[in-house]
């Protein structure tokens, strides 16, 4: 807590923001012991006691006898003033209610619980006579995944999927032991001199330049742009070391939970301790511990998903956004924010630095560096003896394949060659499941979702059909619902499961692993599989875009991209950019050790600008051309877009709201904002609700949020009608 933080004495009138779905501040009296601005408190709210945040002093004129007193100040450090500003600015930028953003910042179970001691389970020594069973093995694996952190018996049983009696038996045997400890413990101190990385000449120069920036006061944004395998992680680990030596905290955002396992090992190897983790894969007790210790400054390094931005850091010095281009940084429900942009905002308010790291930066970040808003540092060579892979095009117009084949003879030969050399190969196809469409051979009817206007995808490994919009599943039917034909369905096109089927036939002696998000029940099981692949325990990896994100497989030398043309279809303004990033990233998985790697792109469009840029190594030329096209069209990052999605139980109700808003379009046009729509969304029905879209477009100079609030003012929606505002939309489905 800062010494200048405002304090309210007993009986002072203060404004409190609660997590309840009412978008306003409420006036309360300060409790007998007083409270600081930014304190987390419990307040009476109707007949309940709810969590709130002391926002500031109240000037509301209200009858004093009606004002209630804050029930209790919770045992947490008050939120820093810049964090309160962050909550307000996120709400303002995303046109979201303040309470919704506060919920993001207080998403911890038992936040109001008093400090207690708990009996925690730890791993002991193996007794001489100890019978290992599958259940006991799961218990040990769960403890190993917690990296030495104690856990209550109930949570351990849940994590290991065993009964508490299994754990009690292991305690009796001496293999596990219990210890009474405070529920929330500080994280071990980081030793910045524990094990220094050996840096290349390029890395050392970039570290020197970044450290000079870190020594300067105030905020700055940095683009760390390095080819795949160039050692960007080692560079920003040294920046983290510098920040910790300066007495501040560091946050690293990762695009996938699956990446936290390898990254935790990198942190521990460099600093001697594991970082605090914040993502959906950690236990509830660990979430509370992270939240509390971050606020006290007793967690120096935090790694996590995008929601880690809303942790209450006491002294934030650095945010790293790894793979900053990744689309998973965009939150798609609730408060619709982009973690990359909000990381820059958070750092600017805290006077901290932000490093945006990528081999293929987003056009927004690339342009900000070009304009001088961000400092750019480049790593142009791979670390050590490894070199960038060759990228070769296989022109599929010249290949003769059967209708049920997708691996060309050239690629098949190269995979066989790699396996013969005890190397690994990767087949990349960005389609989950067995086949994207399943049709009846008799009548042509496709099997669609009952709740969405989309085809259901066959997942043959799970013997189910799945809707990738709403998650609905059902068994594969034997009878066509349209013509009643029996057992006459045909899969159309390949998914990764069908590609695996072909690979099994083509390489019968090879071990094959399919990596797709729907095939793993937990983040930990996916981490285990990735570690197994890294150890060389599979010959052929078949995966979706999950495999393109920062993984390091030392023995992988051949990458085959089965359908790179897939992402080039459609009218998405970011289609070329995303395809370029994905192809560059997945190609970069090859040859990351001493052996030279090669990536093969099977394409029917070898002259497409994206394919040519990838094969010729013309990254900068691609960004320049892409930027020019966007600028001519006044599209982001040279213009502003806001999406409006209206959904209802029927299309008439949704369109009625859309037409009402279109009649008020003069409010928008007078501010320089153009309205498109209303029109049916590309996927009109999702989860049984009909959806229409509207799009607002303006120049970069227009601040759209205040105008949108005025445009929407006075609009009363029934409870069954929803309106979602998406500032800087990434998807238009």
Image (spheres, grey):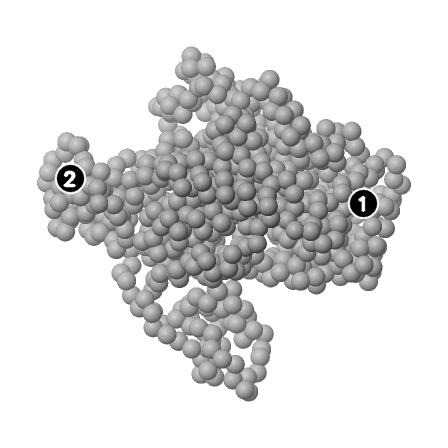
Q: Residue 685: in sight, yes or no? A: no
| Residue 479: percent from left, percent from top | 73, 49
Query: Where is residue 380 shown, x and y percent of the image?
Result: 64, 40
Residue drawn at (66%, 29%) of the image? 622
Provide residue 518's location: percent of width, then percent of height. 62, 52
In the displayed structure, does residue 424 sit left or right of residue 174?
Answer: right
- Residue at 49% of width from left, 49% of height from top? 238
Crowding at label 1, few (<14), some or many (≥20) Cα neighbours within 10 Å?
A: some
- Residue 363 vs 519, above or below: the answer is above
Residue under the image location 58 percent in, 38 percent down: 378
Mark 2–mark 1 CB contact (< 8 Å): no
Residue located 46% across and 14% down the image: 672
Q: Say whether residue 618 is visible.
A: yes
The spot of residue 265 in percent (x, y) is 53, 59
For the C terminus, give its image quadrant: top right
Label 1: element kind: loop
Along the line of sight, the residue nearer the viewer: 338 or 607: 607
Q: From what the image shows, is residue 558 above or below residue 632?
A: below
* Residue 604 left/right relative to 265: right
Please tell me in which quadrant of the rendered image residue 179 appears. bottom left
Between 617 and 473, the residue placed more toward the observer is 617
- Which mark is first along the chain, 1 or 2? 2
- Residue 13's disc number: 2
Task: Point out which mark residue 406 bears.
Answer: 1
């Amino acid at each position: 807590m800062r010494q200048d933080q405002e304090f309210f004495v007993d009986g002072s009138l203060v404004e409190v923001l609660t997590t309840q779905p009412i978008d306003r501040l409420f006036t309360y009296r300060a409790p007998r012991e007083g409270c600081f601005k930014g304190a987390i408190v419990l307040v009476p709210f109707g007949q309940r006691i709810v969590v709130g945040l002391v926002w500031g002093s109240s000037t509301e004129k209200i009858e004093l006898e009606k004002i209630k007193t804050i029930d209790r100040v919770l045992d947490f450090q008050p939120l820093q003033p810049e964090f309160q500003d962050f909550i307000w600015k996120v709400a303002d930028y995303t046109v979201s209610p303040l309470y919704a953003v506060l919920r993001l910042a207080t998403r911890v179970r038992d936040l109001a619980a008093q400090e207690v001691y708990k009996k925690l389970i730890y791993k002991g020594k193996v007794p001489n006579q100890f019978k290992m069973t599958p259940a006991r093995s799961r218990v040990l694996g769960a403890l190993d995944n917690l990296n030495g952190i104690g856990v209550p018996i109930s949570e351990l049983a849940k994590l290991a999927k065993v009964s508490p009696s299994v754990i009690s038996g292991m305690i009796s045997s001496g293999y596990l032991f219990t210890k009474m400890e405070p529920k929330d413990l500080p994280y071990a101190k980081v030793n910045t001199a524990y094990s220094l990385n050996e840096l290349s000449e390029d890395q050392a120069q970039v570290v020197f330049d970044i450290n000079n920036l870190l020594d300067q006061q105030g905020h700055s944004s940095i683009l760390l742009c390095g080819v795949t395998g160039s050692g960007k992680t080692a560079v920003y680990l040294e920046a983290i070391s510098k920040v910790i030596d300066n007495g501040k905290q560091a946050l690293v955002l990762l695009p996938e939970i699956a990446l936290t396992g390898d990254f935790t090992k990198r942190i521990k190897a460099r600093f001697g301790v594991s970082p605090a983790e914040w993502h959906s894969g950690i236990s509830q007790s660990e979430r509370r511990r992270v939240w509390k210790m971050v606020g006290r400054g007793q967690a120096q390094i935090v790694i996590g998903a995008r929601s880690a931005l809303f942790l209450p850091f006491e002294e934030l010095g650095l945010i790293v956004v790894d793979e900053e281009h990744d689309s998973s940084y965009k939150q798609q429900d609730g408060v619709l924010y982009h973690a990359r942009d909000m990381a820059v905002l958070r750092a600017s308010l805290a006077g901290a630095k932000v490093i945006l790291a990528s081999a293929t930066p987003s056009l927004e970040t690339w342009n900000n560096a070009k304009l001088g808003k961000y400092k750019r540092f480049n790593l142009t060579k791979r670390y050590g003896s490894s070199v960038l892979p060759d990228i070769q095009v296989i022109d599929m117009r010249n290949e003769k394949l059967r209708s049920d084949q997708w691996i060309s003879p050239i690629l098949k030969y190269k995979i066989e060659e790699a396996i013969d050399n005890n190397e690994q190969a990767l087949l990349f196809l960005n389609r989950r499941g067995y086949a994207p469409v399943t049709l009846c051979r008799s009548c042509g009817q496709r099997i669609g979702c009952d709740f969405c206007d989309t085809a259901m995808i066959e997942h043959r490994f799970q013997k189910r059909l799945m809707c990738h919009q709403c998650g609905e599943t059902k068994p594969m039917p034997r009878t066509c619902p349209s013509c009643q034909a029996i057992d006459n369905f045909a899969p159309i096109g390949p998914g990764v499961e069908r590609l695996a089927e072909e690979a099994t036939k083509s390489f019968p002696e090879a071990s094959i692993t399919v990596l797709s998000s729907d095939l793993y029940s937990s983040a930990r099981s996916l981490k285990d599989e990735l570690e197994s692949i890294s150890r060389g325990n599979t010959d052929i990896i078949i995966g979706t875009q999950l495999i393109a994100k920062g993984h390091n497989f030392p023995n992988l030398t051949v990458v085959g991209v089965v359908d790179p043309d897939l992402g080039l279809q459609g009218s998405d303004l970011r289609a070329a950019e995303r395809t370029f990033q994905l192809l560059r990233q997945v190609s970069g998985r090859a040859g990351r050790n001493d052996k030279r790697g090669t990536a093969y792109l099977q394409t029917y469009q070898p002259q497409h600008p994206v394919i040519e840029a990838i094969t010729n190594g013309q990254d900068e030329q691609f960004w320049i051309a892409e930027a020019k096209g966007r600028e001519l069209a006044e599209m982001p990052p040279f213009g502003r877009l806001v999406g409006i999605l209206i959904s209802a139980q029927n299309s008439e109700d949704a369109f009625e709201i859309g037409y009402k808003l279109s009649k008020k379009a003069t409010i928008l046009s007078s501010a320089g904002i153009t309205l498109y729509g209303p029109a049916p969304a590309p996927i009109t029905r999702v989860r049984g609700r009909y959806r229409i879209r509207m799009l607002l477009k303006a120049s970069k100079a227009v601040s759209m949020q205040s105008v949108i609030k005025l445009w929407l003012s006075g609009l009363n929606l029934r409870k069954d009608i929803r309106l979602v505002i998406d500032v800087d939309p990434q998807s238009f489905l």
